[in-house]
Amino acid sequence: MDSFRLCVALGPLAVYLLLLGVINLSRRPLMVTGGRDLAALGIGVSGLVLIGPVELLLPEEAVNAYQKYVWLLLVAMYSLGVSLAALLSRPRLTIYNMSVEQLRPVLAATINALDHEARWAGSSLVLPGLHVELHLEPNSVMRNVSLVASGDEQSYAGWRQLDSALSARLKPAESPPNPWGVALAIAAALMIGVLGWQMLEHPQAISQGFRDMLRL
């Protein structure tokens, strides 16, 4: 892989891993919606997608027809694809840097304030007043928990209420840093180091790769 393609592949991924490392090393939990989580992942792997399947399957006729605008169209199509996947996915709330044991009392207090008819069944939860059904999906290794919709018939207004109420409850919460955040930060730092070295050693190759991609 030449210097230009290496930079395109590792650049977004390094930023994504660095962001995950900072989140996991923080003493505060962070909650994001499933759509935002998927969008961040899509951006993180965008470089790998562009120099992998997109470039491999890119028809030469499209390059000749659209010239330098072909990559702009491909980026737009990729962004629309990620957005469509986020819109079609089931509602989800992911709480980073918090174990399921730490989350349960905070979630229970939130649910009691929102819906007195809420019912637990193991790791599943039904909120009739909000028309929300969900189950907990803990990730013990990365120490995060996802609240995932259990069925297709969900109230998005109910999920927004749950999102707002749980976010308020999580603001004063504290959690010890996740040791895996160190590994993520180191991986990101190594990638950034490789990118910096490539830019210093092969600036002309990277500049030429950029020109070739845009057909300048």
Image: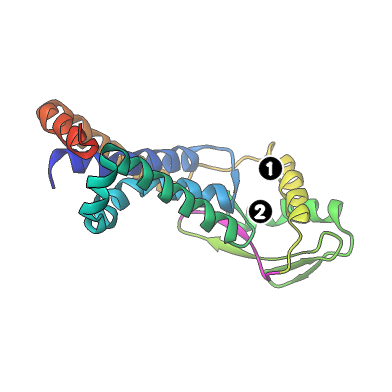
Residue 178 sits above or below residue 172 on the image:
below
Name the secondary structure under disc 2. Answer: helix
- Count of labels shown? 2
**Dot 1 alpha-carbon crowd within 10 angstroms: few under 14, some 14 to 19, many 20 or more:** some
The residue at the point 12 percent across, 43 percent down is: 2
Question: In the rendered view of the protein, which quadrant contains the C terminus?
Answer: top left
Q: In the image, which disc is placed on residue 121?
A: none
For residue 103, the mark is 2
Where residue 15 sits, quadrant-wise, is top left
Is 178 on the left-hand or right-hand side of 5? right
Indicate which disc, 2 or 1, sits on the residue closer to the N terminus. 2
Viewer-proximal residue, 46 or 185?
A: 46
Q: In this view, does 196 lie to the left or right of 185?
A: left
Residue 59 x/y as whole percent: 24, 56
Q: Nearer the viewer, residue 176 or 22?
A: 22
Disc 2 to disc 1: CB gap under 8 Å: no
What is the secondary structure assignment of the residue under circle 1? helix
Question: Which span of residues is magenta-colored?
Answer: 142-152
Q: Does the magenta segment cover residue 117?
A: no
What residue do we see at 58% from left, 38% from top?
Answer: 28
Looking at this view, name the residue that lies furthest to the bottom. Answer: 121
Report the front residue among 64 and 5.
64
Where is residue 8? Give x, y as percent. 26, 41
* Above-or-below relation of 203 to 123: above
Q: How far apart are marks 2 and 1 (CA)?
A: 9 Å
Residue tagged 1? 170
